[in-house]
Amino acid sequence: MLSFKKPTIDDKEWVDNCFRCTSSFNCEYTFGNLFVWSTAYRTEICKYNGFLICRWGKDKDISYSLPIGCGDFKEAVLAIIDDAKSLGIAPVIYGVTHGYKKLLDEYFPGKFNYDSDRAFSDYIYDVDKMAELKGKKYHSKRNHINNFKKNYPNWSFEILGKSNIEECIKLHTRWISDHIDDPDFSFEFEAVLTAFENYEKLDFIGGLIRANNEVVAYTMGEKQSDELFVTHFEKAPSDMQGAYAIINQEFSKQCLQGKFKYVNREEDLGIEGLRKAKQSYYPEILLDKYVATYNE
């Protein structure tokens, strides 16, 4: 029987150890992602025979993660199936990448049906390309950045830390006030506040852009592996030309380049403007993820 609980900051060490057993670039495979969104997504976690298993949702609308860790994968999947049956629901596993789909089909041939949604594919970029923005296809990005520098000649980049977190919260507060009618952005703000409150304990890395002595953009995320960094949050005024482009480039250049090969900038959630923005940076990998439903 699986025993689930809401994640706390004290779970970070053992959860990180489980994530080290996978080579997947899935953006969900970081403790910070699970922890800061745990209230919004009703996330629960379970330690089971060397694996981390997550459960999201409530009542009959519940899905599970794959078993992540080192041990008997098939036995752990069977435990998920049994837990779902005990709740009277169909076993549904979210975030199944191609490699794990093959593994499920190997152990459970014909037992899972798969559905995919383009909205939940991860955008993964080459860090060097994001930092340098070379070539014709990045011409418009360079123009936006040059215009920003021209309009704000006293701009500067800073590493995000205790001394400037409060200013980033104020920036996000102003941003959220422009989207107050969208409950999803309110959930995001709660996740952002949780991230800032636990910033050092989560081992997050972030940066900000200052112009006219005021924070106008910030970003933060965390290491997923020696190759991959995951960007969780990035905010700037939508009407400030070049603000998003310059925080993206400067953070890639000053905090990621030389340390990571790739950066996962997560999903577009089917939001048209967000999809267009993510596509404009030409991802190296578009990581498709399936929802697997047990059909027995």
Image (cartoon, rainbow, N blue to C red):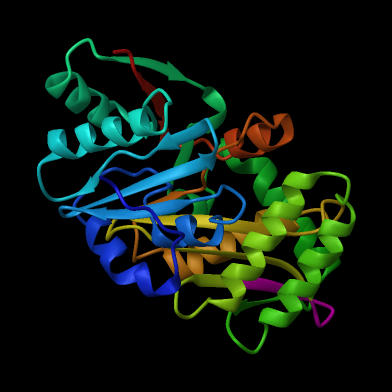
The magenta segment:
207-214
Q: Is residue 134 left or right of residue 86?
A: right
Counting from the top left corner in percent of width and height, residue 126 is at: 41, 47
- Which image quarter holds the N terminus? top left
Counting from the top left corner in percent of width and height, residue 160 is at: 59, 78
Q: Is residue 144 above or below residue 120?
A: below
Q: Is residue 55 magenta?
A: no
Q: Residue placed at 13% from the left, 23% from the top? A: 107
Quadrant of the rendered image containing residue 251: bottom right
Q: Is residue 145 visible?
A: no
Q: Is residue 241 above or below residue 8?
A: above
Q: Is residue 282 above or below residue 187?
A: above
Counting from the top left corner in percent of width and height, residue 277 is at: 66, 38
Q: Residue placed at 20% from the left, 32% from the top? A: 78
Q: Is residue 173 left or right of residue 65?
A: right
Q: Is residue 258 left or right of residue 275?
A: left
- The secondary structure that dominates the magenta segment is strand
Q: Residue placed at 24% from the left, 14% from the top? A: 111
- Which image quarter holds the C terminus? top left
The residue at the far left in this view is 72
Counting from the top left corner in percent of width and height, residue 183 is at: 78, 46
Q: Is residue 209 magenta?
A: yes
